[in-house]
Amino acid sequence: MNRKQTLDLLRKYDIRPTRSLGQNFLVDESVVVDIGKLAELGSDDLVVEIGAGVGGLTEHLARRAGAVCALEIDAHVLPALRAVLHGFSNCTIIHADALQVNLTDLVAAWPGQVKVVANLPYYITTPLIKKILIELPGCSALILMLQKEAADRILAPPMRRAYGPVAVLTACFGTASRKLKVPADAFFPRPNIDSVIIQVVRADQQFSIADWEEFHLFLERCFAHRRKTLANSLKNAGLSADQLLNLPAALARLELDPDVRADHLTHEQLAALYALLTIEL
């Protein structure tokens, strides 16, 4: 769907972009095509699209995937979205806040691969990415369009200011890379800054993490007090007494300095430390 088609649709259904929802509709067909190529869709794929809007991208995905679950929070755009997707029996529109949807249950019955495609508004980018990684660790790929600052947090390496729980979760999930810059003119209304598209591909040999939600909580505790040592941060953030007792031995087994800070550790080291602290040493 190009700019003219999108603007005509907005006028027809009297849709005014909602600033509080961070609504910026994608109106550049070439970007839609690029996203489709990055997703590498086939008939065995279920796509979970977060923020379907008026369906410009959704329609493109539906032509290539086995099924699409299109999540959209804004009731005002639903009539237009339903009209655009009327001829696609493989599309399910879900009117809901993606943060409140159980993504695990949503895809449980699908026998093939699951992929996530999303144009994420800035104000919920980090919570949504964490939710996707925690609830869909078996997802084969994520194609995310987001603002540069949010992408920096996802792709940050150790010892960088942006490095934190979401970067560690992403790295444990698979390989993340920045693929395309999307100019502000590709959207209506035009945002103040450009966006980027990142691709996250699930690792063939993914880390064996029994409970991704608990692992995320552990990471939040590790980075809760960034300027403190890892041990002090975990203690102040409420790590259990038994795990605190085992922490020195776990650090020693991994040949880590007892005064190391969380932001100096790689995702491999943090995952290994979590594993040691959740089994009997």
Image (tube, rainbow, N blue to C red):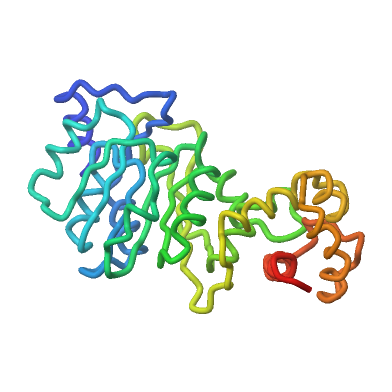
Q: Quadrant of residue 250?
A: bottom right
For residue 206, above or below residue 131? below
- Tell me if 81 is positioned left or right of 264 in this view: left
Percent position of residue 144, x then y: 44, 52
Q: Residue at x 50, y 56 (%)?
A: 133
Percent position of residue 131, x then y: 49, 49
Q: Residue at x 26, y 41 (%)?
A: 94
For residue 9, above or below residue 252? above
Image quadrant in which the C terminus is located: bottom right
Front residue of 259 and 231: 231
- Tell me if 76 is positioned left or right of 159 in this view: left
For residue 152, above or below residue 11? below
Percent position of residue 231, x then y: 86, 55
- Tell me if 174 is positioned left or right of 104 in this view: right
Percent position of residue 276, x then y: 73, 70
For residue 148, above or below residue 66? above
